[in-house]
């Protein structure tokens, strides 16, 4: 080979390959073996230049000595954690929403700390999957341990990823995929609670705002309401309603009714005092101020934002909260909380 061609090639290639060629010749002189021959020759044996390039180029897939990057939350080496194969690195895309996973119709999302803890307390068997930030894992270590024992999946993800999943920044760093609750009928509810000496149930008509409904359910759970009647029980599956309720939805039975009039009549037959709560005092409707009203042991409270004369006519009594010139009415969830407080402490 002439001097010009020798000088035109990178010297670092020659230093490595000349050493390899010496080894290759010595192997041939000793009889050699196929493995050494293939390692030294690479993919091409007809060009010295190609030998130089192949010698210095090592694709990742053939480099067996390179270890995969360790997950940020992997405790395998240090703690011998049973979660090692279930925990994902934060940079990895989770399996919900935007990488192929499709939420089923019978499932819903629950997010925020108290709501997720309430689901785990009241109906943990409905849990399908958990998404959680690394900062919140300590708060939910009992839930994570249970998921591992049940061989259910969970992903440790970033705050941005949970925001994409829930479509809201108000998720608190934790989100559950859960099976939707199966609502009861009024007859089912009466079979379960009719033998109780004291009971309170609410019938909610035309309250579709998830924040109002969530606040109402929080008050209901706080004052010991056992059931809530709705035309659309799927409103209670709203992630926003669950977040505002702070877990209260899980503590109250969901009752579906397509006919409120028939349901109210059935409650009357089982000894319930049916009371309609007016959003505000109306001269056209005769009502009693809350402070002058006496409740029985079993109460069914009917609530609505828009006046429903049919429901008012079915009620045994009608009550209102006395306002003033500055504010004549309260938010429906606040008004309900005041009435439920009076029912609880007067009964």
Image (cartoon, helix red, strand yellow):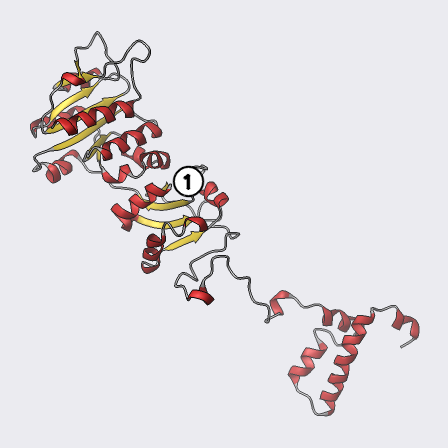
Residue 18 relative to residue 104: left or right: right
Q: Nearer the viewer, residue 329 or 209?
A: 329
Q: Nearer the viewer, residue 318 or 94?
A: 318
Residue 139 relative to residue 288: left or right: right
Pick out the residue farthest to the bottom.
30
Q: Is residue 236 above or below residue 261?
A: below
Q: Quadrant of residue 296?
A: top left
The residue that appears at 84% across and 69% down in the rendered structure is 9
Residue 93 relative to residue 200: left or right: right
The residue that appears at 30% across and 42% down in the rendered structure is 180
Q: Quadrant of residue 290?
A: top left
Q: Is residue 239 above or below residue 335?
A: below
Q: Where is the C terminus found, in terms of image quarters?
A: top left
Percent x, y for residue 270? 7, 30
Percent x, y for residue 291? 17, 18
Q: Is residue 235 above or below residue 40?
A: above
Q: Nearer the viewer, residue 140 or 93?
A: 140
Q: Is residue 259 visible?
A: no
Q: Where is the N terminus found, in terms of image quarters?
A: bottom right
> Exactly how many numbered labels are in the figure?
1
Residue 245 relative to residue 308: left or right: right
Q: Is residue 173 above or below residue 347?
A: below
- Residue picked out by circle 1: 171
Circle 1: is it few (<14), some (14-19), or many (20+) Cα within 10 Å?
A: many
Q: Is residue 274 visible?
A: yes
SS of the residue under disc 1: loop
Percent x, y for residue 159? 48, 44
The residue that appears at 26% across and 40% down in the rendered structure is 250
Q: Quadrant of residue 272?
A: top left
Percent x, y for residue 28? 73, 88
């Amino acid at each position: 080979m002439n001097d010009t061609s020798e000088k035109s090639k990178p010297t670092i290639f020659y230093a490595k390959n000349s050493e390899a060629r010496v080894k290759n010749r010595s192997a041939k002189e000793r009889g050699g073996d196929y493995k050494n021959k293939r390692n030294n020759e690479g993919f091409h044996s007809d060009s010295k230049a190609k030998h130089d390039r192949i010698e210095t180029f090592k694709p990742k897939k053939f480099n067996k000595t390179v270890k995969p990057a360790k997950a940020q939350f992997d405790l395998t080496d240090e703690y011998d954690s049973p979660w090692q194969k279930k925990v994902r690195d934060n940079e990895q895309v989770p399996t919900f929403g935007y990488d192929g996973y499709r939420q089923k119709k019978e499932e819903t999302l629950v997010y925020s700390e108290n709501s997720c803890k309430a689901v785990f307390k009241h109906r943990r068997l409905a849990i399908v999957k958990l998404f959680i930030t690394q900062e919140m894992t300590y708060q939910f270590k009992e839930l994570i341990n249970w998921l591992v024992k049940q061989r259910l999946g969970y992903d440790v993800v970033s705050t941005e990823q949970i925001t994409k999943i829930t479509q809201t920044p108000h998720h608190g760093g934790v989100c559950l995929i859960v099976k939707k609750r199966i609502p009861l009928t009024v007859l089912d509810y009466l079979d379960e609670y009719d033998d109780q000496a004291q009971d309170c149930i609410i019938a909610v008509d035309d309250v579709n705002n998830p924040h109002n409904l969530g606040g109402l359910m929080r008050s209901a759970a706080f004052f010991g309401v056992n059931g809530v009647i709705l035309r659309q029980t799927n409103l209670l599956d709203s992630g926003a309603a669950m977040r505002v309720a702070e877990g209260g939805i899980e503590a109250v039975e969901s009752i579906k009714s397509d006919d409120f009039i028939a349901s109210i009549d059935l409650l009357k037959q089982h000894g319930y005092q049916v009371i309609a709560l007016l959003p505000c005092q109306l001269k056209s409707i005769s009502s009693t101020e809350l402070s002058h009203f006496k409740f029985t042991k079993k109460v069914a409270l009917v609530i609505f934002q828009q006046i429903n004369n049919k429901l008012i006519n079915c009620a045994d009594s009608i009550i209102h909260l006395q306002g003033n010139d500055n504010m004549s009415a309260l938010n429906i969830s606040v008004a309900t909380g005041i009435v439920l407080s009076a029912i609880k402490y007067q009964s």
